[in-house]
């Protein structure tokens, strides 16, 4: 169900009642954020500043990125006050 | 193992009361300041907003493509010459029809400062009841990084390139937010992405102020592609812009200016420009011109905020 209350159609050609468009932005990533759960103090700055808003709370202990959509910009690693997030080259994770 | 030191969740997250209406994979550059702003606005203001906007970086996502859309908000796409006039029509319709919602006119600096400034000024003067948000990436980034009215002195763009006869923009930037505050509208403010709590407060104040009339928000949103800095530095660029007084944070209620953040010891502008490739060619003398411009604007802003305290305003402030 769409929450679009005021206009039935987005533009002359698009319709919010259809499933939303979603790109595979996870495939753009060249560096992957890796969270050190021990260092994370659960302050939430990574979730706040993440442009894609993909940092998800894991219970109340730490945050983890949704790697399906993370573009790998590295803002979370830069803004983390405890340096708990490090950017590792994506190639290291390919088999 | 030692006990893990548990921090407190930042209070700014409390402002995010509503769901994110955008789908996860949206076609913005990695590290885009605009995407962060665009996802932040409906999470703070609620999903019952109608966004109207123009061709810009925001348009491909807000307008939707191939029968599908990227979000569930209501969006009305219009031309750059008539952005504020369209928002006027929408706001007046919803008021007359008795529908309670918020019309947000969401444009870049090209529309707000250059092409659509005429009707922006007109809508402000008529005090139309909607929120106008200008995201300032200092140029026409979507069409290929041309200079705009808010492009600062010395910045290299595709229309003010580096070469034998040109060393970047040779003119100073305009202060759009101050111009809008001078319209004596109920609310005008500047905000940036490094201080999200401040941005959320100003968004909510703008929503409240639009009951009395026009609300204008000038948000500094850096462009990683156009300016040439590493994507992870988006927030750092905003932070340094505030710390060098390059982009001071203030708000004006009915034209009465108040600084919302004062920097005790402003850093030299070179701490900001060294992060960004579009300023990389500036030498000492050029940086001094930029610094003088920043100092002059900040001094003027400080003077105005002090003066407004002394002068009797014809309209009573409701702050």
Image (cartoon, rainbow, N blue to C red):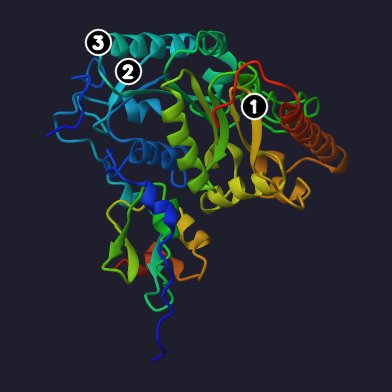
Chain bearing mark 3:
B
Name the residue tied to disc 3.
Answer: B97
Q: Residues within 10 Å of mark 1 (few under 14, many from 20)?
A: many
Taking the image as shown, residue A93 lies to the left or right of residue B281, namely: left
**Residue B212: where, in percent of width, then height?**
45, 19
Name the residue tied to disc 2.
Answer: B76
Vertical position of residue B181 compared to residue B295: above or below: above
* Residue lying at 79% horizontally and 40% vertically, measured from the top left: B282
Q: Answer whether residue A88 is visible to the viewer in this image.
A: yes
Q: CA distance from mark 2 to mark 1?
A: 32 Å
Question: In what element is the residue under mark 1?
Answer: strand
Taking the image as shown, residue B13 lies to the left or right of residue B146, namely: left
Chain bearing mark 2:
B
Kindly indicate whether the residues beneath marks 2 and 1 are on one polypeptide chain: yes
**Residue B32: where, in percent of width, then height?**
47, 42
Considering depth in this image, is B310 or B38 the residue closer to the camera? B310
Considering depth in this image, is A93 or B24 the residue closer to the camera? B24
Please report whichever mark, 2 or 1, sits nearer to the chain's N-terminal start: 2
Vertical position of residue B86 compared to residue B29: above or below: above
Of labels 3 and 1, the one closer to you: 1
Question: In what element is the residue under mark 2?
Answer: strand
Kindly indicate the quadrant of the structure image that contains residue B311: top right
């Amino acid at each position: 169900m769409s929450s679009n209350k005021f206009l039935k159609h987005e533009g002359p050609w698009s319709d919010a009642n259809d499933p939303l468009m979603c790109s595979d932005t996870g495939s753009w990533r060249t560096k992957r954020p890796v969270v050190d759960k021990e260092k994370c103090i659960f302050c939430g700055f990574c979730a706040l500043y993440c442009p894609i808003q993909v940092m998800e709370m894991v219970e109340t202990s730490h945050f983890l990125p949704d790697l399906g959509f993370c573009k790998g910009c590295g803002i979370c690693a830069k803004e983390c006050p405890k340096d708990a997030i490090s950017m590792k080259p994506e190639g290291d994770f390919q088999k | 193992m030692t006990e893990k030191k548990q921090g407190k969740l930042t209070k700014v997250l409390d402002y995010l009361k509503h769901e994110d209406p955008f789908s996860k994979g949206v076609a913005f550059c990695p590290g885009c300041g605009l995407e962060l702003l665009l996802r932040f606005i409906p999470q703070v203001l609620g999903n019952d907003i109608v966004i109207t906007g123009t061709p810009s970086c925001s348009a491909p996502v807000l307008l939707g493509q191939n029968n599908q859309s990227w979000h569930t908000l209501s969006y009305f796409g219009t031309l750059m010459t008539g952005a504020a006039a369209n928002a006027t029509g929408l706001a007046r319709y919803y008021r007359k029809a008795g529908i309670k919602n918020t019309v947000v006119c969401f444009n870049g600096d090209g529309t707000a400062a250059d092409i659509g400034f005429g009707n922006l000024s007109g809508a402000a003067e008529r005090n139309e009841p909607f929120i106008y948000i200008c995201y300032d990436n200092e140029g026409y980034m979507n069409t290929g990084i041309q200079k705009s009215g808010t492009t600062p002195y010395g910045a290299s763009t595709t229309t003010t390139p580096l070469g034998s006869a040109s060393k970047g923009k040779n003119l100073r930037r305009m202060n759009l937010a101050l111009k809008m505050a001078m319209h004596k509208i109920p609310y005008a403010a500047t905000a940036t992405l490094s201080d999200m709590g401040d941005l959320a407060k100003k968004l909510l104040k703008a929503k409240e102020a639009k009951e009395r009339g026009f609300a204008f928000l000038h948000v500094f949103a850096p462009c990683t592609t156009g300016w040439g800095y590493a994507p992870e530095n988006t927030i750092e660029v905003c932070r340094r812009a505030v710390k060098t007084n390059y982009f001071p944070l203030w708000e004006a209620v009915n034209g009465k200016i108040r600084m919302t953040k004062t920097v005790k010891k402003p850093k030299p502008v070179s701490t900001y420009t060294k992060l960004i490739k579009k300023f990389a060619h500036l030498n000492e003398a050029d940086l001094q011109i930029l610094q003088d411009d920043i100092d002059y604007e900040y001094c003027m802003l400080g003077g105005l905020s002090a003066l407004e305290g002394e002068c009797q305003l014809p309209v009573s402030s409701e702050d």
